[in-house]
Amino acid sequence: MLLGLVLTGSLYSAFAPAQAGSAESNDALVAEGRELFLVSCAFCHGKNGEGVVTVNGTQYGPPLAGVGAAAVDFQVATGRMPMAQPGQQSAVKARIFDEEETAALAAYVATFGPGPAVPNESDYSLEGMSDADREEAISRGGQIFLTNCTACHNFGGNGGAMPRGGQAPSILNTTPEHIYEAMLTGPGNMDSFSNGNISPEEKRDVIAYIETIRNQPEYGGFGLGGLGPVSEGLFGWVVGIGGLVGFAIWIAAHTTRTTKQPSKGADA
């Protein structure tokens, strides 16, 4: 019994202080996040993240219960939030909150309900994999990307227009962490790909594929922004067909012309 009491007390003294310190640290982070939230976010999302709807039915900000820390990190770290005013779609801009403030906001919003956590680097990195496994992962990620993502972000990841004034942004300059969070949370018009739809390993593979096309050369020559057949067709008609029509007009304008005069015999 004495040995058991000594062992239990030793284990408690070894692990309890760290747990208490971690809890106190998290409480302080949540308290800081609440202050930032009330100042910068509550106008649209409500004081408790319940969302705000006007008398006319306008949705200022959606409810935040269950969005998780990952959604907050994505929206705030990319500068999409806070918005100057509610609109059709939040645009990427310079971030207002630094990393510590973003983490505090994420910790506070996470208290509204269970939701996706901010991913770790190990979740979206191929570090430590062999070359063969890496190539297989990239190939698998390319198939998933072509099946699920190209309808909006196009084959080159440059984005494109969406219905009702929306826009799918380019993902070529988006960090792997934010790509993972976007797939996990489905911001804006984007579908939410939970781990049940696309596993964490498949999300990692998609990110690996996107990393390979960032610096991929334009094997066909001038890429026209990588926007696909619309820009290529427009270029073909305006420059190609237009150039041929202009050249044909130029040839016709500089062709030698002759004017036949009626002969005297014909007049007689």
Image: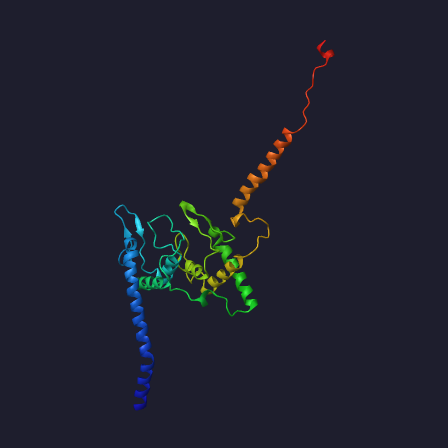
Toward the viewer: 84 or 137?
84
Residue 19 horizontal/vertical position (percent): 32, 75
Q: Is residue 156 above or below residue 14?
A: above
Q: Residue furthest bottom?
A: 2
Toward the viewer: 62 or 14?
14
On the picture, is 78 further left or further right than 255?
Answer: left
Looking at the rendering, which quadrant does residue 80 occupy? Answer: bottom left
Give the total of numbered labels. 0
On the picture, is 224 further left or further right than 54?
Answer: right
Quadrant where the N terminus is found in the figure: bottom left
Looking at the rendering, which quadrant does residue 77 occupy? Answer: bottom left
Quadrant where the C terminus is found in the figure: top right
Q: Is residue 207 visible?
A: yes
Q: Is residue 1 visible?
A: no
Q: Residue furthest top?
A: 268
Identity of the residue drawn at 31% across and 50% down: 59
How is the model colour-coded? rainbow
Q: Residue furthest right?
A: 265
Residue 67 horizontal/vertical position (percent): 35, 59
Residue 253 horizontal/vertical position (percent): 63, 29
Q: Is residue 28 above or below residue 178?
A: below
Residue 44 horizontal/vertical position (percent): 29, 53
Identity of the residue drawn at 41% across and 48% down: 166
Toward the viewer: 158 or 134?
158
